[in-house]
Amino acid sequence: MKVTTVNVNGVRAAFRKGLGDWVDNDDSDLLCLQEVRATPQDTADLFGPAWDVRVWPCRVKGRAGVALGARRDSGWEIDSITEGLPPDFYTEIGGEPDVDSGRWLEGEIHGPDGATFTLVSAYLHSGELNTEKQEQKLAYLKRVGKRVDQLGARAVAGAGSNTPQEALICGDFNIVRTARDIKNWKPNHNKTSGVMDEEIAFLDAWMADTLSGRDGLPCVDVGRALAGDTDGPYTWWSWRGKAYDNNAGWRLDYHMATPGLAGKAQSAAVYRAPAYDARFTDHAPLTVAYNFAE
């Protein structure tokens, strides 16, 4: 089974730039999309009948929006979906703010031979230092952390049973973890949103760097575990200047899996368009192959 996550930076624009051709020639079974910025019907029309696509738009027009997609002939199906984090996470502020909508979509996935797991498409806030956007980002990270802990605890409770409760959270987290994840670490570290120690601490509390996981951490950074101790592989490059040509990128996109599912990961690949002007988004698709036969 192959799962691809990509921030499409507007799905209609991405299709105009070649996303449709890429999907047609790719063999992913499941997709997680972020920054869809389109209605469910418009998105379904773009992907066509070969795909079952579920979209949760943001209530703020022109922002965010996440989607899950299953190729209909893949043997993998999206069953029930849940939009957003649990409502009780927002009780103290009277409900989910509009800026948090269209950022977390959970789907129950069913596959061959009774395989099941929870798949999440997640788009975490980008933030901006010394503004309300950064405050929104940090508040959302705290709530996401609660859900990650819940999914991790559920996986532990189901380990070894006939109905394991594993989870895979994919998406654009808008945070790097170490100097290996960004070409220009020094000029950005603790000076730019996404490279702040306060933000990085959340990811380090969620993810281990080995496929077997680590005691006390609910999930695994599958991309890092498979890549090892190397720079990148980066998944985002600015449109400006020569960032893409010089590979001055950031690793912002993740496969974050509970250890039982992470252990099934076989390989990871980042698709890099052959040229700057051949990209359909400023992010690159990140694909991981998982072997459910083992």
Image: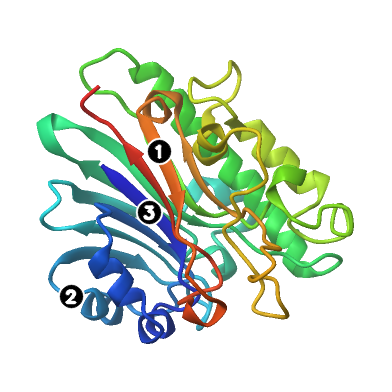
Q: Which residue is tagged 1?
A: 267
Q: Amino acid at mark 2?
A: Gly
Residue that appears at 55% across and 25% down: 210
Against 43, residue 67 (above or below) is: above
Can the viewer see residue 174?
yes
Q: Secondary structure at mark 1?
A: strand
Mark 3: few, some, or many residues within 10 Å (few <14, many ≥20)?
many
Against 224, residue 172 (above or below) is: below
Does the residue at mark 2 contact the one at mark 1 (Cβ under 8 Å)?
no
Mark found first going from the N terminus, 3 or 1:
3
**Front-most of residues 97 and 140:** 140
Residue that appears at 15% across and 51% down: 74
Q: Amino acid at mark 3?
A: Thr
Q: Quadrant of the C terminus?
A: top left
Q: Amino acid at mark 1?
A: Ser
Image coords of residue 183 (percent x, y): 75, 56
Q: Which residue is tagged 3?
A: 4
Residue that appears at 55% across and 38% down: 227
Image coords of residue 271 (percent x, y): 45, 59
Q: Secondary structure at mark 2?
A: loop
Q: Quarter of the image holding residue 157?
A: top left
230 horizontally vs 198: left or right: left
Image coords of residue 12 (percent x, y): 38, 83
**Front-most of residues 172 and 94:** 172
Q: Which residue is tagged 2?
A: 48
Q: Quadrant of the N terminus?
A: top left
Mark found first going from the N terminus, 2 or 1:
2
Against 256, residue 78 (above or below) is: below
The disc placed on residue 186 is none
